[in-house]
Image: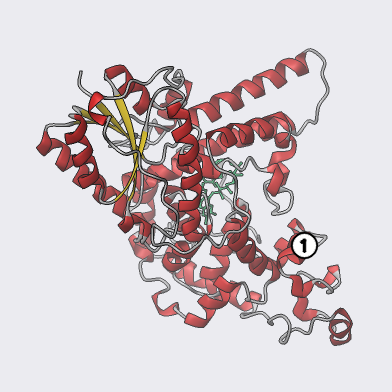
Amino acid sequence: MGPQIVWFKRDLRVDDHAALDGACRAGPTIGIYVFEPELLRLPDSDPCHVAFVRSCLAELRERLAARGGRLLIRIGDVVEVLGSLQRAVGASAIWSHEETGNLWTFARDRRVAAWAEASGVAWHEPWQNGVVRRLPTRDGWSRIWGKRMATTAVPAPEHIATPAGAADLDDGPIPTLAELGLAASRRAEPQAAGEGEAWKTLRSFLAERSIDYRAAMASPVEGWEGCSRLSPHLAYGTISMRRVHQTAAARAAELKEQRAAGAAFAPTWLPSLASFQSRLRWHCHFMQKLEDHPALEKDELNPVFRGLRDDGWDDELFAAFCEGRTGYPMVDACMRCLDATGWVNFRMRAMLVSFACHHLGLPWQPVGVELARRFVDFEPGIHYSQAQMQAGVTGINTVRIYSPAKQVRDQDPEGVFVRRWVPELEGIPTEHLAEPHLTPPLVQIASGCRIGRDYPAPLVDHATAYAAARERIASVRRTREARSEAERVLARHGSRKRTPRRRGPRT
Ligand SMILES: Cc1cc2nc3c(=O)[nH]c(=O)nc-3n(C[C@H](O)[C@H](O)[C@H](O)COP(=O)(O)OP(=O)(O)OC[C@H]3O[C@@H](n4cnc5c(N)ncnc54)[C@H](O)[C@@H]3O)c2cc1C
């Protein structure tokens, strides 16, 4: 067969890479990564995503070179870039993994498909996780996920033959953010990138850090080390979902064997690994929603909630939320932590959307876009599905309205996280950190932090906002139309796992 092209997208690895493996088996192969200026300028793109990708590419290039292969790097329109490479090397096929991206990448892939067909070039798109293309029904999806995860992973090719026609092609430098026309990334403490780092992260998690995962995941303090921190690696594909799943399953089996042989270890460990494994499935469960319904990036899955907060836009509230000056220490600490690092744990992400949409009454779309830019691990399918769910607009999930003060008391009782990211509150006694505006005036003076001067008073009253938000959602949910739409959404997108019905807890 003729020369093959591997178009790397969100799969920046050589191990367990079905597209690379398939191409190398079919003929001499050349890899390419394309920085797409239009994509980089979308509202939910951020220099921190590009910075992560840049580091991955440096390592990917080395790993391909170690096998005799090459990675070209280009800036431009993918159809033009692939077209010119295909003509230069006389490629008969292009390989890339299926991508569940945003509306822009969906449209771009359609253009690539049209070009490939018109040019007589085959475009092979193997799957790379448990997201199923053209899934007719959610019934049985979980079984397909399990079957895929049980298949054998493909090791990196030992040797990659390069097409003769590529000899004169320049590899192309990895462009700097400035060369891509982007500002420097604001995240001064981002997570390390690359395939080697992905494996290091997985191994350290399974070897030790996972011991108390189930409890640690709720806290922004313990979660920092106690969560796997694999999310950017899964989002940019520096490790495959199948490898993570299989390695975690092997670790759980090993621990069970050790226990059977009399070894003693924390009783939390095995349940923690089970929780972790279920989250791997969730990763694909949420992405499947976007795969099945690409418009969910912008429109509510459940149309009865459309426009629910369209009257709620307020520039000042939004700016205060983004800048971490809402007067709610946990909200402000999380926004500032995200600004510097690009990561907070699940519960805090959910609280941020809940606060912005329920307390401040902002529509979920701009809130989702703002957070997408701050999450180094931005994965559109998970992100927009979760944003809708936490904003209470799916009609099928329990509506959770988090109390940011309760989150300080429960998840940061010593105030370590809040004091680190909101240093104005440094001197406020721990017992007042959850609601610093209730600190007696003399204590405020003694602690060097006057509420309203050094740190804002709460933008909104929690109890009032909570009651109004519940009523706003409930008034829609109790309509007949809402109930019938909820059934439709559940049938198309809902998890088939039965969970006991309960009233929304005070979170
Ligand atoms: C509003 C909101 C937006 C989110 N946006 C993203 C996003 O853009 N990208 C992203 O990867 N995750 C997102 N999540 C899910 C979750 O918060 C992160 O996956 C997790 O915090 C990443 O840290 P970790 O890798 O240490 O996770 P771990 O707890 O160690 O979990 C392991 C992996 O399982 C998956 N996972 C964990 N929790 C979830 C979940 N609730 N839903 C789906 N998959 C999950 C992730 O791939 C994660 O890397 C979002 C959650 C919320 C509430």
- Residue at the spot x=16%, y=37% of the render? 116
Residue 255 at x, y = what percent?
Answer: 71, 21
Q: Position of residue 128 (x, y in %)?
A: 40, 32
Residue 494 shows in this picture: no
Residue 288 placement, left or right of 63:
left
Residue 119 placement, left or right of 366: left
Q: Is residue 397 left or right of residue 254?
A: left
Residue 503 position within the rendered picture, expressed as x and y whole percent measured from the top left: 59, 56
Q: Nearer the viewer, residue 455 or 257?
A: 455
Colour mode of the rendering:
secondary structure
Q: Quadrant of residue 400?
A: bottom right
Q: At 55% across and 63% down in the image, what residue appears?
A: 186
Task: From the image, tell me which residue sits under label 1.
Answer: 409
Measuring 46% from the left and 46% from the top, which residue is drawn there?
A: 53
Which amino acid lies under the numbered mark 1 shown in the image of this protein? Arg
Quarter in which the C terminus is drawn: bottom right
Task: Determine if residue 353 is in view.
Answer: yes
- Relative to residue 175, is residue 283 depicted above or below? above
Q: Residue at x 69, y 41 (%)?
A: 214
Q: Is residue 106 above or below residue 13?
A: below
Quarter of the rendering occupied by the N terminus: top left
